[in-house]
């Protein structure tokens, strides 16, 4: 028997059999938290919030809650408030306990009692509030219902006292407050406002009409963001297209329901060349797509071709537009709500329910065909855009056929500027893309040649958003990147051929560096997506300060939210009496010599790198036009405020 089991047994002495089961259930959660919430890292910590918020979202989707508030309290505990019916407080026959107690103490309970409505939210792990309770040092719930305020509290999931009435109220709803247990969340118990805020905004887009807010009450970080979109996912599309040029004013919005599956689609075309289709199932972002996307794509292609032929925009003997043609410049959000979603794929973010192909296809086809009939001007623009795309595609194909034998992207043509490494084992090799020739020089001499390769690029790389495939292929900087990576391009792209499993973007820690990084990320997002999905892309994090005593560097300070405090600390630590260390501020990689660059930024033992997620890159892509616009000042401010870094890694 483990120590923990003994403790629980002792606690359980006064309980009956059902309560011992409760304790065993909670103990299982505390012993293997990862099985219930995915991980106990920063991800898991944030996951707790969604396990709670999902319950309020369900109550909103059932039509009873209109407002949800999320608070990060001063001590990094979380409060979630809704104005729904309130969790039931009546005694359940089966357990002899109030329903609310069961919700928080029995594994897998919650959601379905009371009948009617199905649970639509529910995260990837979908196990609910008892898990959050088990993983919190303290959790309390207040239910406003029947004019009374009911209260109960728990410690590490164990009931402190019976549910009791602590006051009167004229409102209704549920308030849950919890403190994640630092014994479980050993990496961090500090909440990231931006991370919560992003998801809260996404939930507002995905659940039309919902009012949801997030507030940070921590000292010095006080802020609130509140969201409410009457347009739902149509507003989401407008948001995604904010800095792009749309070819018609208002996004198309369709919705329908069949066999208890609700399907919503919002879409708008822009003058861009790429497609941007996001899909969701039960509010979960299905990064890997799935049957809802499949049904949507098939329907889109068929309906546009049917319309084009019927209206003689495309002649009977002409080839149909392909899926790629009709998705060029398309921004779309697909959201389905399913009573029993099946998630598949490597990251469990692919919708697998096979019946959803037909349902999405049917519902979207009907609504979209009707839209085209009623909006002939918009319909004509969409078809014309597709025809243009098909012409460009055919021209590019011809051009490629002519030059097939010397496409130039074969490894035998490795670019001259590439300083390759000795090893050819992708498991250990790293490709550094370095901005500028001088930094490239330092990186070449400073690196470990065994496994680190350097590809210097010149300041400007092509804006891929404004360029066609053949233009992109003709660009020197881009070609050398693709050749070095060895993955091929376009339809021939093959991530398994990657010559390096780390692709590290190393740019100056200044505005221009951030700009170039964004250009590269957009290129990778658009044309090397599998490399990104495989987790191969990193951003190097050169220090911004060096703390020097005499000529010796004692400490490097990395950029980040706490950089100034860390600098103060380092100064204090390396001061001797009145003699203070000197501070060097690094404006660019060029200011470091080869040895410093190795030590601070490239040496796997010391360096800090941020792994880029698909979402980071998607965000870079979204803000792209802002960066590429003609006005310099807003751009500069924007980059300074939004340099795209993500979570730490390695
Ligand atoms: C269930 O069916 C009967 C009426 O109440 C329904 C219900 O449970 N509503 C509900 C639960 N609203 N809000 C919650 C809830 C809110 C939070 C913040 C946390 C939890 C676990 C539940």
Image (cartoon, helix red, strand yellow):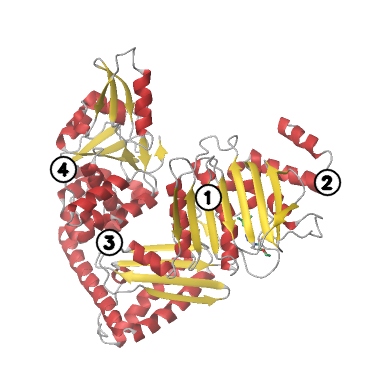
Label located before the other in sequence (1 or 2): 2
Report crowding for label 3: few under 14, some 14 to 19, many 20 or more residues within 10 A (C-alpha): some
Q: Position of residue 434 (x, y in %)?
A: 22, 38
Q: Which mark lies nearer to you, 4 or 2? A: 2
Q: Position of residue 401 (x, y in %)?
A: 18, 62
> Which numbered disc covers residue 71?
1
Position of 369 relative to 604 (above/below)? below
Q: Is residue 273 visible?
A: yes
Secondary structure of the residue carrying numbered label 3 = loop
Ligand 1 visible in quadrant: bottom right
Reading the image, the residue beneath label 3 is 243
Q: Which mark lies nearer to you, 3 or 1? A: 1
Q: Are marks 1 and 4 in contact (CB under 8 Å)?
A: no
Secondary structure of the residue carrying numbered label 1 = strand
Residue at mark 3 to residue at mark 2: CA–CA distance: 61 Å
> Which numbered disc covers residue 298?
none
Label located before the other in sequence (3 or 2): 2
Please identify the quadrant where the C terminus is shown. Answer: top left
Report the side of 600 relative to 160 (left or right).
Answer: left
Secondary structure of the residue carrying numbered label 2 = helix
Secondary structure of the residue carrying numbered label 4 = loop
């Amino acid at each position: 028997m483990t120590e923990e089991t003994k403790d629980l047994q002792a606690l359980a002495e006064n309980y009956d059999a059902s309560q011992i089961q409760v304790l065993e259930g909670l103990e299982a959660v505390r012993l293997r938290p990862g099985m219930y919430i995915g991980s106990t890292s920063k991800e898991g910590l944030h996951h707790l919030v969604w396990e709670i918020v999902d319950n309020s979202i369900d109550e909103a989707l059932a039509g009873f809650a209109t407002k949800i508030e999320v608070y990060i309290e001063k001590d990094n505990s979380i409060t979630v408030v809704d104005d729904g019916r309130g969790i039931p407080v009546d005694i359940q026959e089966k357990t002899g306990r109030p329903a609310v107690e069961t919700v928080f103490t029995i594994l897998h309970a919650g959601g379905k009692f009371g009948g009617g409505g199905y649970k639509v939210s529910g995260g990837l792990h979908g196990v609910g509030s008892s898990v959050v309770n088990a993983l919190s040092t303290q959790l309390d719930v207040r239910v406003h219902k029947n004019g009374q305020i009911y209260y109960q509290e728990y410690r590490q999931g164990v009931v402190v006292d019976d549910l009791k009435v602590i006051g009167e109220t004229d409102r209704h709803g549920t308030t849950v407050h919890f403190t994640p247990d630092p014994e479980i969340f050993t990496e961090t118990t500090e909440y990231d406002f931006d991370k919560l805020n992003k998801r809260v905004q996404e939930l507002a887009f995905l659940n039309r009409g919902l009012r949801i807010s997030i507030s940070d009450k921590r000292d010095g970080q006080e802020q609130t963001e509140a969201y409410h979109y009457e347009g739902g996912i149509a507003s989401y599309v407008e948001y995604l297209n904010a800095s792009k040029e749309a070819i018609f004013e208002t996004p198309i919005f369709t919705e329908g329901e069949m066999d208890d599956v609700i399907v919503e689609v919002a879409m708008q075309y822009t003058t861009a060349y790429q497609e941007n289709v996001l899909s969701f199932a039960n509010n979960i972002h299905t990064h890997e797509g799935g049957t809802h996307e499949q049904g949507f794509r098939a329907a889109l292609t068929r309906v546009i071709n049917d319309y084009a032929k019927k209206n003689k925009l495309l002649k009977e003997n002409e080839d149909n537009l392909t899926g790629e043609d009709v998705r060029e410049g398309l921004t779309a959000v697909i959201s389905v709500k399913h009573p029993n979603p099946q998630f598949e794929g490597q990251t469990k973010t692919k919708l697998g329910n096979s019946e959803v192909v037909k349902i999405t296809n049917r519902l979207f086809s009907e609504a979209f065909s009707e839209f085209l009939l009623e909006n002939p001007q918009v319909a004509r623009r969409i078809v014309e855009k597709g025809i243009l795309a098909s012409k460009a595609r055919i021209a590019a194909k011809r051009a490629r056929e002519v030059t097939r034998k010397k496409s130039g992207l074969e490894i035998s043509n490795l670019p001259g500027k590439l300083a390759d490494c000795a090893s050819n084992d992708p498991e250990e090799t790293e490709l550094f893309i370095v901005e500028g020739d001088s930094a490239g020089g330092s990186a070449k001499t400073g690196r470990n040649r065994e496994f680190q390769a350097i590809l210097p690029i010149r300041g400007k790389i092509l804006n891929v958003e404004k360029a066609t495939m053949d233009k992109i292929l003709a660009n020197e900087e881009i070609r050398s990147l693709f050749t070095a990576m060895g993955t091929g391009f376009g339809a021939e792209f093959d991530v398994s051929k990657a010559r390096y499993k780390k692709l590290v973007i190393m740019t100056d820690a200044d505005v221009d560096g951030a700009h170039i990084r964004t250009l590269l990320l957009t290129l990778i997002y658009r044309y090397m997506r599998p490399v990104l999905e495989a987790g191969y892309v990193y951003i190097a994090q050169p220090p911004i300060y060096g703390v020097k005593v005499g000529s010796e560097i004692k400490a490097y300070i990395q950029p980040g939210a706490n950089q100034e405090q860390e600098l103060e600390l380092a100064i204090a630590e390396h001061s001797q009496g009145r003699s203070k260390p000197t501070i060097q501020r690094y404006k660019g990689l060029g200011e470091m010599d080869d040895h410093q660059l190795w030590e601070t930024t490239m040496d796997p033992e010391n360096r800090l790198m941020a792994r880029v997620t698909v979402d980071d890159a998607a965000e870079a892509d979204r803000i792209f036009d802002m960066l590429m616009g003609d006005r310099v000042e807003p751009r500069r401010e924007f980059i300074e405020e939004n340099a795209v870094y993500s979570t730490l890694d390695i």
